[in-house]
Amino acid sequence: MKVCFDCNAKNPTWATVTYGVFICIDCSAVHRSLGVHLTFVRSTQLDTNWTWLQLRQMQLGGNANAMAFFRQHNCTSTDAQQKYNSRAAQLYKEKLHQMAVQAMKIHGTKLHLETSVEPVKPAEEKEEVDFFAKHTTQLQAGDQFEDSFGNLDINNLNQPRSTYAVNAGSSLGPNVDSASNTSAGDATEDRKPTIGGRKTIPKRSGMGAKKGGLGAHKVKTNFADIEREATMADQLKVQAAEEAKMAAERSAEEQQKHMASMRLAYQDLGLQQKKEEEKMKRVDPKKAQQYERLGMGFASRA
């Protein structure tokens, strides 16, 4: 499974072709902020105009190779600024670029690279066969076979098998004297009859049907419990409808109270303005007339 090179997030959909590693969409934003002189990011799903050099860097790079190189050069920082401004990052970037350029020179625009080539096995050298020596050895083998066949005693072949076994010795076969001396009667006495000695299996009644049919069990249903649950469900529905109705009535009542309080506040404001106007007329009548003429009087506001 692919993971992000920086944060180990699963299934990354972006890549930095500068280092040939896969990164997630969050880390791609961090790489963009570092600048294209340090890292160049591309989407593995949305971008289609990849160059051959970028593809070679992704083929020759990889998260595992980059991680091993960074660890080898003691670069284990998780901060992006320190990580990609380090000497290890610069060395790996140059090394990967050189490898990609070399691969382009060797393979050109060939899509798949042959990473491993099986060693060619050397052809087995055929031994030179001497025709005359080969036939000489075959003739010698045939003569030896005929000599061994001629040494067999033909009289021994005509003897019965039991006699031949006794003459050959006890080590060449079993002794059959005791077996030949036993009579047929003793053999029949030792052997116990098996016919009729087996236990009879009682037959099952009813065409072999098992108890319970096809394994189905009768389920006991309590209709009283079902009816009680249905009644409780209906009661809950009615209760919910009543609560919704009460909430609507409550909101309408609160709205009416709010409107009434606003009317009272407006009336209080009008009375206060009238009082201030009368006070102004008593203190400075000319000034009050000027305010009314200019439309700035308290009466116009009311």
Image (cartoon, rainbow, N blue to C red):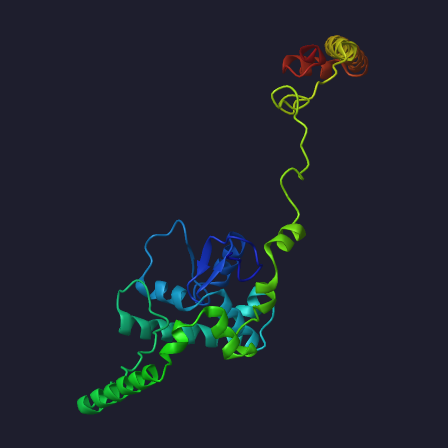
Residue 157, above or below 49? below
Comparing 212 with 110, the one in front is 212
Residue 195, above or below 95? above
The answer to whether residue 252 of the structure is visible from this angle is: no
Comparing 249 with 98, the one in front is 98
Comparing 261 with 42, the one in front is 42
The answer to whether residue 197 of the structure is visible from this angle is: yes
Residue at coordinates 60% horizontally, 64% vertically from top-left?
181
Q: Image quadrant for the C terminus?
A: top right
Residue at coordinates 67% horizontally, 40% vertically from top-left?
197
Q: Is residue 199 left or right of residue 232?
A: left
Residue at coordinates 53% horizontally, 69% vertically from top-left?
67
Name the spot of residue 139 as percent of width and height, x first. Answer: 23, 87
Q: Is residue 254 left or right of residue 191?
A: right
Q: Is residue 192 left or right of residue 283?
A: left
Comparing 119 with 270, the one in front is 119
Name the spot of residue 167 as percent of width and height, x first. Answer: 50, 78
Name the spot of residue 140 as percent of width and height, x first. Answer: 26, 89
Name the spot of residue 223 as percent of width and height, x first. Answer: 75, 10
Q: Is residue 140 left or right of residue 115?
A: left
